[in-house]
Amino acid sequence: MEAQAQALLERQALSEADEEVVTDVYLTNMISEEEREELKAELDKLKDEIATLRQVLAAKEKHLVEIKQKLGINLMNELKQNFSKSWHDVQTTTAYKKTQETLSQAGQKATAAISNVGTVISKKFGDMRNSPTFKSFEEKVETTVTSLKTKVGGTIHSGGCFEDVLSSAAHASAESSVVSARLPETEEELQC
């Protein structure tokens, strides 16, 4: 029978209640009744001390809140201070410093690459401007500007650069629109 009980105990886990009974039986056999009473008294004393400490802590927290209110310290200020401190702590870590160095190097390399691309594009525009097709287009624009100036009555500057020609064309176009947008002077013009 005892072998069967032992086999049953081995197969089933003890529940919490069973563990407490086993512990009580074990402790009862190990300590005397006098020691047991002393431990119970000490337990009650600890419970009372914990309750007192909780009351003291609650009073201190209330006093802390009152002082903060008098000083004008609110939750937002505290959050800002905590964030600033945390950010400072992050910036002083080695991982942050290494990441910052890596990003700085990557930025320098990207700047150099963009500069090289800009140089290549400028060179290509220079080559395009010196191409026969562009020269032909420039001459056509100059001819058109000259004819516009002649029609408007402006002065003609020969041998100007392309930018001067475009500027003159814009000026001539502006003068032309001013002339066509004048106000009517006679009653007949007003009736039309």
Image (cartoon, rainbow, N blue to C red):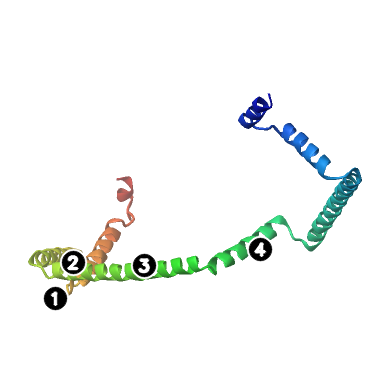
Mark in the foreground, 1 or 3: 3
Query: In the picture shown, does residue 33 fall above or below 102?
Result: above
Disc on res. 159 = 1
x, y percentage for residue 170? Answer: 25, 64
**Which corner quadrant of the image does residue 29 belong to?**
top right
Q: Amino acid at mark 2?
A: Lys
x, y percentage for residue 21? Answer: 77, 34
Q: From the image, tell me which residue sits under label 2.
A: 149
Q: Amino acid at mark 4?
A: Gln
Q: CA distance from mark 2 to mark 4?
A: 70 Å
Residue furthest top in the image:
1
Identify the element where label 3 is drawn.
helix
Query: In the picture shown, does residue 45 fall above or below 93?
Result: above
Q: CA distance from mark 2 to mark 3?
A: 54 Å
Mark in the foreground, 1 or 2: 1
Left or right, 45 with reference to 88: right
Q: Reading the chain from its start, which is encountered first: label 2 or label 4?
A: 4
Q: CA distance from mark 1 to mark 2?
A: 15 Å
Q: Amino acid at mark 3?
A: Ala
Query: Residue drawn 69% across and 27% down?
Result: 2
**Which corner quadrant of the image does residue 131 belong to?**
bottom left
Disc on res. 106 = 3
Q: Reading the chain from its start, which is encountered first: label 1 or label 4?
A: 4
Query: Residue drawn 12% across and 65% down?
Result: 134
Mark in the foreground, 2 or 4: 4
Query: In the picture shown, does residue 41 fall above or below 164?
Result: above
Give yes or no for contact between labels 1 and 4 (Cβ–Cβ under 8 Å): no
Crowd rating for badge 3 (residues with CA inside 10 Å; few <14, some 14–19, many 20+):
few
Total count of labels = 4
Q: Amino acid at mark 1?
A: Gly
